[in-house]
Image: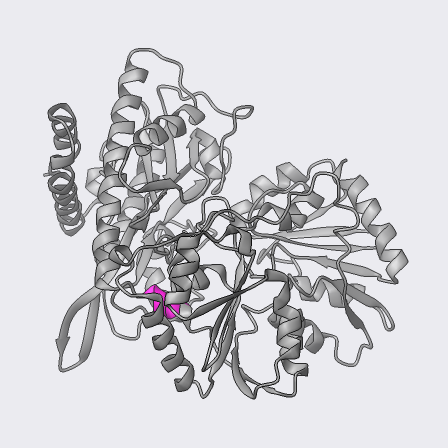
Amino acid sequence: MTANEKLALLRVQMKQAGIQVYYIPSSDPHMSEYLPDHWRSRAWLSGFSGSAGVMVVTETESALWTDGRYFIQAARQLEGSEIVLQRMKEPGVPTVTEYLTARLSVGDVLGLDGMITSAAFVGELEKAFEGKEVAIRTVDLISPIWTEDRPPMPATEAFVHPLEYTGLSAAEKLAELRKNLAKENADSILLTRLDSIVWLLNIRASDISYTPALLSFCLVTPERTVLYTNEERLTPQVREHLAANGVSIAPYARVLPEVEALREPLRMLCSQEDLSYSLYAAMVANECITVVEGAEPVQPMKACKNDTEVACLKNAHIKEGVAMVRMEMELERRLADGEKLTECDVHDILNRYRQPLPLFLGESFSCISAYGANAAMMHYSPSPDHCAVIEHSGLLLLDTGSQFLDGTTDTTRTYQMGPLTDEIRRYYTYVLKANIALARGVFMKGCSGANLDILARSQVWQYGIDYRCGTGHGVGYLGGVHEGPHSMRMTNTYPLEPGMIVTDEPGIYEEGLVGIRIENELLVVPACSTEYGEFYRFEAVTRCPIDTRPIVRELMTFEELDWLNAFHETVYQDLKEHLNPEEQAWLRQKTLPIA
């Protein structure tokens, strides 16, 4: 069926339910960024496959909102449908709430699925609709029309993440969580975020592509911990591990009725951003539950990596660097021999070198292998039927990462494939300067991404250029490649603390011309303590050489070149013992100091 045909079926359901407008988020019951295929209803309905976006369907029109990372992709994938693309934060573009408010009249009903819509968004709508006499009804209208090809709910086999990689047992983490709840004047929490649950309990599965998630909820009270999941996926080893750490098991579907049925007096910490509207409403309606509004506490607990996690993560980056070196060597050799290679071939070559690496589990996200103008689409991914041939000119952008049992990696490099225009060489240098500016940053305790994003962005701003995304994001530990609560963007005010990982990935994206991004993962570490307070700095943990061929050297300062030379020497020293003599010699040439 086409998108328009699916929308026609949805409108039949809307009419039967007495609903004038229907809202479709990109979400699941866990407010996940990357979704199990079962809940990719917005993508199924619209044809737009990007990870970020929401839809609104009225009786006569439909619209889709997405952010700047996906403007180009969304415009292409929506072409031929009735759906109007709303480019978020662009001049004249209404927000979703503004759009809904303008189209709902007195007596109208807005429909949405309360199990996959956040309580925070529903609260925003209720405030916007005050005095308008618009009703909000929780109803799933997608399931009746998405029947034949809808993937089932995932239930992959769970496994234990061993203590030698986690540094803390699940029981120790649960004890720390209960202490943190007490600090918020609470004693209980229903965890819904999958990354929080698997980290807390030291278990993993593969319920989401690229992310070792276990579809589950976790109730933590003063006396008990209950994991709600499909029990059939739990091996005897996992059951034994959970029992040893004081965790009982219940069916996944029991979570909502059990919240409704709780009869012990509990002070439950709730983050409306992380909790579905249906679950939040059940808590509010339960007279035994006192709702305590506050941020979900496991996110900051796992954001600050412990010593074991940091050591393991550094080892994971060395392995990733080895694979990247071998991939680049083979790519250079085969292109020099006149072979015809595509973007997909680059991805396949890299994965061939990753597969034998110790503790490798898979990729951490869909590889972005983008040649030439394709790289201007920030989240472009090639496919066998849409895969550019790599020529002996221009740039190749490779954004990729791995899941190892001892860590999660995310690395981007942009490689010179042949002659470049002066303009593209300058763009490349601007991006490298932006990357180094952030990496060299020293900052006071209490600073956040909102304070530091400008260190990178100002390097391109001075040329009248910007990039429509943040400069970086947190990275999980055998978890999601995007995890918070911190990030490197102008809107994130969560303070950076030692042990946090954040990516450093500024870029320049010119539609139809080029896309350039250079990304390292940075570890926040102490710098010094003076009469003025505590200061932190960044330590780059990525171990992959940066292509120096496109650099316009006269645009680089001595301090920038010193940082780059020191980084490359560290890359060489950390990787050389894992490489054969030919690979060592190649890497030595790639990491020679720039005078």
Q: Which of 427 and 116 is in front in this view?
A: 116
The part of the chain drawn in magenta is 299-303
Q: Position of residue 245 (x, y in %)?
A: 37, 68
Q: Can residue 121 be seen in this view?
A: no
Q: Position of residue 542 (x, y in %)?
A: 25, 47
Taking the magenta stretch, the answer to whether it contains residue 247 is no
Quarter of the view holding residue 259: bottom right
Tell me: residue 152, above or below residue 552. below
Tell me: residue 378, above or below residue 65. above
> In which quadrant is the N terminus drawn?
top right
Quarter of the view holding residue 475: bottom left
> In which quadrant is the C terminus drawn?
top left
Q: Which of 516 and 500 is in front in this view?
A: 500
Q: Nearer the viewer, residue 203 or 592?
A: 203
Residue lying at 38% horizontally and 46% vertically, measured from the top left: 507
Residue lying at 73% horizontally and 35% vertically, measured from the top left: 80
Q: Nearer the viewer, residue 552 or 341?
A: 341
Q: Main secondary structure of the magenta part?
A: helix
Q: Where is residue 22 in the image (x, y as percent from the top left)?
A: 77, 59
Q: Where is residue 524 in the image (x, y as percent from the top left)?
A: 25, 63
Q: How many labels does the image show?
A: 0
Residue found farthest to the top = 338
Tell me: residue 111, above or below residue 232. below
Tell me: residue 71, above or below residue 125. above
Residue 582 appears left or right of 267: left
